[in-house]
Amino acid sequence: MDKYLQVFLIGIQNTLVYRVNFLFRAAVALIPLTGTLYLWKAVYAGKAEGSDVAGYALSQMISYYLLTTVVDAFTAVAEDDWQIAADIKDGHISQFLIRPINYLGYRFSLYLSGRSIYTVVALLPVGLFVFYLREHFVWPASPVAAAAFVVSVFCAGLLQFLIACTMALLAFWVVDVSTFIFIQFAFEYIASGHLFPIDILPRWAAQILMLTPYPYLLYFPAGVYLGRVTGPDLWRGLSIQMAWVIGGFLLLRWVWSRGIRRYSAVGG
């Protein structure tokens, strides 16, 4: 574990070089969020006072988007998938195959270091934004919801990393994985609940999306926090989320083993 800790610390040092870039990235990300919130305020303004949308009061809807922004800051994959694909394409991965270090463990350590710095840097603009909207921000529905939310965010981070890595490993078979990554990102943007809460969709559409791992990246943690997922549904949802993490890990290991068999590098 010492070598992965060293990778994590080196990743922290390298990431700190770009801390101002992260600060601006986090601040700029609030611009489309602001537009989305004003749009929903206009929607609620056209309704009778006290009305809701799919069971969401205005404060809950605003809190939902703030929560997805926070969860995204904790868990989103930045450049990891592109870097993995580049390592395979350029042959840089060869150096890890002849050394006593697991490449996937190495990438996960860098992912943790990158998320750690980005989250700390993003606390300032996101914290100020939440403070500005404090009258609409709701607190966890219960202590159980708060604890389950933390567990769910941790699992969401693992799932994000596993999905990104698996997509990047397609570089063992294709020269350019950008098309696959962009398609996956576009589907994730909708299916994860980033664009809107999934449960405002028709019931049949929401049920289909819940069969995929994507709702467990943003929508499910936010629903847990807001108390929209409770009782047996909460424990069942956490179990499904953890099952997706386990399944994603097994799939990643399988893709990795198959990819390594056909990998070849020329030169040095």
Image (cartoon, rainbow, N blue to C red):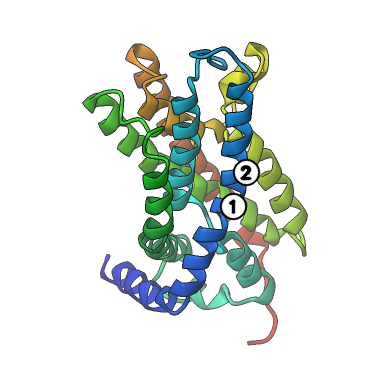
Q: Nearer the viewer, residue 96 or 144?
A: 144
226 is higher (above) or lower (below) than 128? above
87 is higher (above) or lower (below) than 123? below
Position in image of residue 258 (x %, y %) = 62, 53
Residue type at mark 1 is Ile
Position in image of residue 78 (x %, y %) = 54, 60
Position in image of residue 18 (x %, y %) = 48, 75
- The crowding category of the residue bearing disc 1, from other C-alpha atoms within 10 Å (few below 14, some 14 to 19, many at least 20), is few
Taking the image as drawn, is residue 207 in sight? yes
Q: Residue 143 vs residue 46: left or right?
A: left
Position in image of residue 8 (x %, y %) = 35, 69
The residue that appears at 33% across and 68% down in the rendered structure is 4
In the picture, residue 82 is in which quadrant?
Answer: bottom right
The residue under label 1 is 31
CA–CA distance in space, label 2 to label 1: 7 Å
The residue that appears at 60% across and 20% down in the rendered structure is 200
Secondary structure type for disc 2: helix
Taking the image as drawn, is residue 158 in sight? no
- The crowding category of the residue bearing disc 2, from other C-alpha atoms within 10 Å (few below 14, some 14 to 19, many at least 20), is few
90 is higher (above) or lower (below) than 160? below
246 is higher (above) or lower (below) than 258? above
The residue that appears at 43% across and 59% down in the rendered structure is 108
In the picture, residue 130 is in which quadrant?
Answer: top left
The label number, if any, that marks residue 35 in the structure image:
2
Residue type at mark 2 is Gly
- Return the residue found at the far bottom: 268
> Which image quarter holds the N terminus?
bottom left
Q: Are marks 2 and 1 in contact (CB under 8 Å)?
A: yes
The residue that appears at 52% across and 66% down in the rendered structure is 24
Q: Residue 224 vs residue 51: left or right?
A: left
